[in-house]
Amino acid sequence: MFSWLVEAGYLAGNPLALSRRKRRQAAPRVSRFLPEKHWDLVKASIEAMPMRSEREKLHASRCRWLFSLLYIGGLRVSEICDATMGGFFSRRGADGRERWWLEITGKGNKTRLVPATGELMAELMRYRKAHALSSLPLEGEGMPLVMTLIAPVKPMARSAIHELVKGMMQAAAAALRRRGPDFEAAATHLEQASTHWIRHTAGSHLSEKVDLKVVRDNLGHANISTTSIYLHTEDDARHDATAAGHRVGWRLL
């Protein structure tokens, strides 16, 4: 009835139509990520891990491989725990080039292909060599993506992954504190970082270099609006433009 009244010109708008509209709230930008300089500190802490004993070597190798998966692959912890090395496969593209991929089953039981870059494959071979495995996994291999150090070999538990990541963040924060009291705020921010922060860090860093659709598909987002929360550079540019061109201009007294 209201629609007919609008069409007949008796009403300017349909009040019921307005009430049925869902209020859409813009997703806030992600703040739980590491800027490049803090990410460099984390990498340095991993590279400085002791490797005196065989166990320390295996632990350092696993830590480096785990952070490679979290950052290069942008994987969720659940995806790492559930996947096996048999998920890696090589495929020849239309251009004749061979490319490696990692098949992952993620949220909602959805399967996606994560680009296994040359760097990620080099880290995979490095990790497998530390465990006296062949350089590349066999098709359908059931070896866990990240392994326990103690036999029998099992997938690393979620809690253990979270604990390992937290330990590296604390080590990086300690290194930052040694620079002096001016770095206390940054060190505190690093200490708060969790495993999922690495995925956010990967999305944030990648979105500054490639098309947003690439980030969406790599991270397995259903909608590109989810991926857009990583566009921090747009916020920064908007902040700079506002600061440069929008002023009250009070006189200094």
Image (cartoon, rainbow, N blue to C red):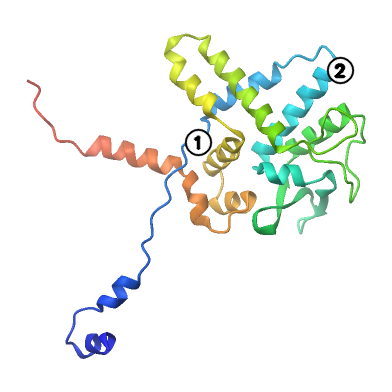
Label 1 sits on residue? 32
Residue 243: x %, y % from top left: 26, 35
- Against 35, is 75 above or below? below
Q: Is residue 86 shown above or below 125?
A: below
Would you identify the image quadrant in which residue 234 lies?
A: top left
Side of 240 where 120 appears, left or right: right
The residue closer to the viewer here, 93 or 71, is 71
Q: Secondary structure at mark 1?
A: loop
Q: Is residue 40 left or right of residue 2?
A: right
Sequence-wise, the earlier of marks 2 and 1 is 1
Identified at 71% across, 31% down, the residue is: 160
Say which residue appears at 49% left-offset and 44% top-offset. Answer: 230
Q: Which amino acid, mark 2? A: Glu
Q: Residues within 10 Å of mark 1 (few under 14, many from 20)?
A: some
Q: Residue at x 57, y 41 (%)?
A: 206
Q: Which residue is mark 2?
A: 54
Give the quadrant of the N terminus: bottom left
Identified at 80% across, 18% down, the residue is 56
Between marks 2 and 1, how big is the CA–CA gap?
35 Å
The amino acid beneath tag 1 is Arg
Residue 166 shown left or right of residue 102 in the figure? left
Q: Quadrant of residue 196?
A: top right
The image quarter containing residue 193 is top right
The reply, left or right, for residue 15 in relation to residue 248 is right
